[in-house]
Image (spheres, helix red, strand yellow):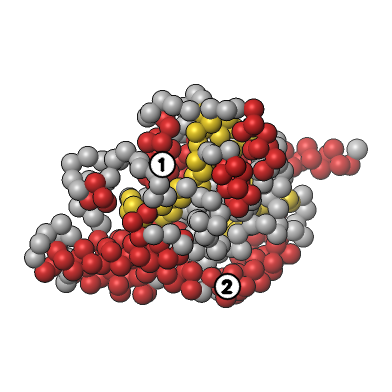
Amino acid sequence: MNTSVYLDNAATTRISDTVLEGMSVYLKESYGNPSSLYALGRDAERAITKARERVAAALNCLPQEIYFTGSGSESNNWAIRQCTVDSGQGTVITSEFEHHAVLHVLGNNTILLPVYDNGLVSPEDLEKALSENPYVKLVTIMFANNEIGTVQPISEIGEICKKYNVLFHTDAVQAVGNIPIDVKSMNIDMLSLSGHKIHAMKGVGALYVNSRLRLPPLILGGAQENNRRAGTENVAGIVGLGIAIEEAVADMEQKNAELLKKRERIYNEVMKIERVRLNGELQRRLANNLNFSFEGIEGEALLLQLDLKGISASSGSACTSGSLDPSHVLLALGLPHEIAHGSLRITLSKYTTDNEIDYFLQQLPPIIEKLRALSPVWENIKREEAQ
């Protein structure tokens, strides 16, 4: 199959040309260890400093409040474990549909806020939980969901946390570069992000930590990252992250306007298919995200059929792609197992073309029809309709 249509940008993105060019200098020429005193080392150290300033500018924080990590998952783990779990102190409030890099870190003293069928958490639920639980130390709510793309009321959540003097962390891996973020005005104390979601390379992320906080070190054995994360820095990756986040913020408005047009066209056509539903609210979601459930089919079968046509998509988080269980995100919305199993996530990027969308919209309906013709579940649905 020569056709290649990539519609899984929530899983990862291609590196932009400017990011690759900027990184290459620190792979082939200025490849020194940033901790070394000679010129090559000093060049690398200055490059990291510049990248730190770029990330800080994108979030409206101080450069010294940015710590580079190996991924968004590592950033989540660091913020949550070092702040609460490892210290054994305090309760954590989170939501039912967080990424597993958050949910799998939490201990027994955890309060799970419900997620409603529109894909949003309620600030009122958070305030009620805080008022009834005086020992809460941390609230962690993702900025934008990685599967259904819904954008949470982060400013309201931050204001409530400030009112109750509770730390607020947000997993912003999907949001950074796609939504304007100001950690100060939004009262965010810690924020996780990842490079490969915004056209940088895999294996580099960052954690914002408000300067009034002092997290214990994540890795011991060196003075890197202000004595908080030992190990020689991934200079090229960090440089790429700095370039990518600066690019993403600069063209965010124009990019989102173009993505919304493409998203609307996909939505209008896919919703013509019988027995399909959109998961999560349409308006309050990332401009590049659509998540559908098709009754009477299995998501895995749908992905395989799309792949045979040269189309890359997903049924949920790439981090749980090996699981046969339905998405915990869709179950949190109240979907029954049989419908949650038939999900399809489409996520676009600035590189997605109209021709690619045309091809996807041409191939999807006959694939759905083919799979339903083979499905005893669909046969039962049609039989019940006829009665």
On screen, 120 above or below 175? above
- Relative to 29, say whether 322 is above or below: above
Say if residue 285 shows up in the picture.
yes
Q: Earlier in the sequence, mark 2 or mark 1?
A: 1
Q: Which mark is residue 165?
A: none
Q: What element carries label 1?
A: helix
- Compute the Cα span from label 2 to label 1: 30 Å
The kind of residue tagged 1 is Ala
Amino acid found under the numbered disc labelled 2: Glu
Is 327 displayed left or right of 80 in the figure? right
Q: Which residue is drawn at 18% across and 60% down?
A: 34
Horizontal side of residue 74 vs 189, given as left or right = left
The location of residue 123, given as percent across then percent down, is: 67, 43
Residue ID for mark 2: 253
* Camera-side mark, 2 or 1: 1
Q: Residue at x 47, y 31 (%)?
A: 106
Q: Which residue is depicted at the point 51% across and 25% down?
A: 109
The circle drawn on residue 79 is 1
Q: For the residue carrying disc 1, how many other residues have a C-alpha within 10 Å: few (<14), some (14-19), or many (20+)?
A: many
Residue 346 pos. (x, y %) = 59, 58
